[in-house]
Amino acid sequence: MLTACSRIGFDTVYRRLLMLCAFLTCSSAALAQHKAYKEIESSLLVTGTIDVTPAGDVAAYALNRSEKLPTGIVDMVASMAPQWKFEPVALQDKAVSRSEMSLLFIAKKQENGKFSLELRSAYFMAPAPTAQEERLSLDKTNFKPPVYPLSLQNDGVTANVYVAVRVGRDGRLIDADVMRIDLGRIGSQPQLQRWRNAFKRAALAAASEWTFHVPVAGADAGKAYWVGILPFSYSFDAEPHAYGTWQTYVPGPYTIIPWLDDKYIADRDPGAMSPNTFHAEGESRRLLTPLGGG
């Protein structure tokens, strides 16, 4: 974890934190009593590509629209990425494989007034897309995303909801649960809980109607079930988070889901997954070294 405020312009982050706090219509003294005020953090999702050798070493990488990113973030990736090592893969007639990557950076204000910065999680797509019949995918024919809870229409709350699903051989849900809910507004603990409960009900109600295409060929075809995660973003803007800008929110607690393999999420926070996109287990490549390098 770094405290590199001067290098990446955390004055911008601080302004966003203040804007978030302005949602509250209470005094500063009352605001300080809110536990959520100490929990708020800002995230920056950075995307790009990474080239990996068959042995799992990084040959090269590139960040999308690096000119839009804070200099400190670009420097951090430059220092860490060459040290990463991935699980080896067998390649035919290729010296390297290229994967899409998403990197989730988190900034948080400390008690001493400084900001901490960390690369909290990353998501690296498999080196090559598998055939449709060999992977789990969302059936988009009749897919309906979660609707905004009517009970919150006067509260102006935005949220990122991470829905985990377990799919049976018939393509229908066996189980669904919400891993975490991050809220774009601060409030008292009872308010935060009420908002999260409303978003969870809406997400699970929608998920109960989802259907999937299950693997019918390949190594995964014989499984009794398959799992995946769908991060969903509730926002009032058509393009809520411009690339290269920070998103400020109150992070939610994690829910332990017994049927979700720990190895699936062990190396990454689901926040690094692309929002509003279904991510099936097995679609990412495994990083063997710490994100911080080494």
Image (cartoon, rainbow, N blue to C red):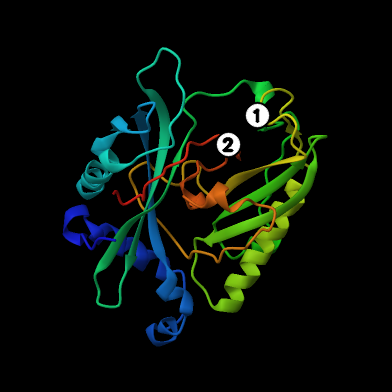
Residue type, numbered disc 2: Gly
Name the image quarter holding residue 101.
top left
Q: Does residue 94 show up? A: yes
Q: Which mark is residue 282?
A: 2
The residue to which callout 1 is attached is 135
Which quadrant is the N terminus positioned in?
bottom left
Q: Quote the CA–CA distance across marks 2 and 1.
A: 8 Å
Q: Residue at x 35, y 18 (%)?
A: 95
Q: Residue at x 45, y 15 (%)?
A: 92
Are circles 2 and 1 on residues that touch, CB within 8 Å? yes
Residue 150 position, x and y percent, is 70, 59
- The relative height of residue 285 versus residue 190 in the rendered view (above or below) is above
Label 1 residue SS: loop
Residue type, numbered disc 1: Arg
Q: Depth check: give the residue in front, 18 or 264.
A: 264
Q: Circle 2: is it few (<14), some (14-19), or many (20+) Cα within 10 Å?
A: some
Label 2 residue SS: loop
Residue 24 position, x and y percent, is 47, 74
Q: Depth check: give the residue in front, 264 or 76.
A: 264
Count numbered badges in the picture.
2
- The relative height of residue 30 versus residue 102 in the rendered view (above or below) is below
